[in-house]
Image: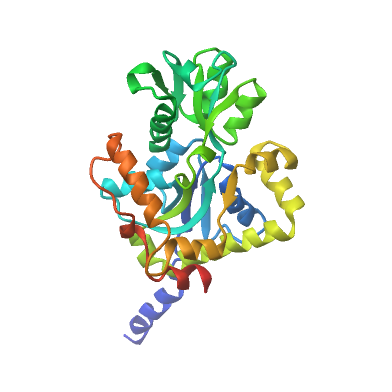
Amino acid sequence: MACLGILPLLASCFKEAPAPLRIASSPWPGYEPLYLARDIGYLGGSKVNILELPSSDITLESFRNHSADMATLTLDETLELLSNGVKLRILLVMDSSNGADAVMASPRVKSLADLKGKRIAITNIPLGVYMLSRLLDAAKLTRDDVNALPANESRHASLYQQNQADAFITFEPFKSKLAALGAHAIFDSSQIPNEIFDLMLVHEEVFQARHKEVCDVARQWFRALAYLKQSPDDAAAKMGKRLGVSAQEYRVMAGGITITSQTENLRLLSGMAPAIIPPSENLSQTMWKAGQLKHSADIRQALDPGIEACIAK
């Protein structure tokens, strides 16, 4: 009987460690500091497993179906998830796009007006549809004026080479790959500022159950940004190598991206009036009018009043 009484204590000694947090992500220069944090030892394999997925649509679906605990997704994708009832939290704002998302066109498409009747390849995610809507607004065209071809970003270069599309709604590093083949930008995110933000999301139940571990991911992200600032050449070389480009080519890709600092994160996500709310409401209205949202989406549902203690402690 005495031995039996000891058994629960022995079991507690051999309690299994929690599985690593699964973070889904896909190619985008603004996400690279996440991999940098892993590669320089800030995010250990026992705590975090970064799922390197080939395209953003797969990242979105992996988060939606709970194959991932966390994911790197855009603000419009976040609104779409909220609209469909997914309970989530915004852990941090990773970056904002200032030219890195673009519409790349073949040389025969010289202006926005030339898009009429043309084939436009778009990524099959909310961002692709949203960029198409903003492009058509700028070109003063309707959806019926163009032929939209759903195709994930990893296929855009081959479609260009095979002359199967005339323009491509894409983003880095695929934008630079198309440029190397002869395509040119006719519209980009610098023309629609404060509309494309990249976020790190976490499922609500994971945020509550593993709060300390989730917050540590955010802190290691900012630690990696500090490393990037202190050792820019080494960091650019490491991040460029992962994307298959030189350090200089990586810098060019990242030139259309503004990485969001910890201070800016607090301005966007915390306080009495988080600064991310107005652009989110504008984006939600645009998506609603374009038929991208089935139900209204309020970004406030995804904001945590205690986020400052989580990411800046």
Residue 286, image quadrant = top left
Q: Nearer the viewer, residue 234 or 289?
A: 289
The residue sitting at 24% across, 40% down in the picture is 294
Q: How many marks?
A: 0
The image's colouring method is rainbow
**Can see residue 241?**
no
From this viewpoint, which residue is outermost toward the left? 295
Residue 291 falls left or right of residue 140: left
Q: Would you identify the image quadrant in which residue 291 lies?
A: top left
**Residue 231 at x, y percent in the picture:** 74, 57
Q: Tell me, yes or no, if residue 215 can be seen here.
A: yes
Identify the residue shown where x is 54% and y is 12%: 163
Residue at x 54% of width, y 16% of height: 109
Across and down, in percent, residue 265 comes to: 50, 61
Q: Percent position (x, y) of residue 52?
A: 53, 43
In this view, the residue in front, 303 or 68, is: 303
Q: Residue at x 68, y 56 (%)?
A: 228
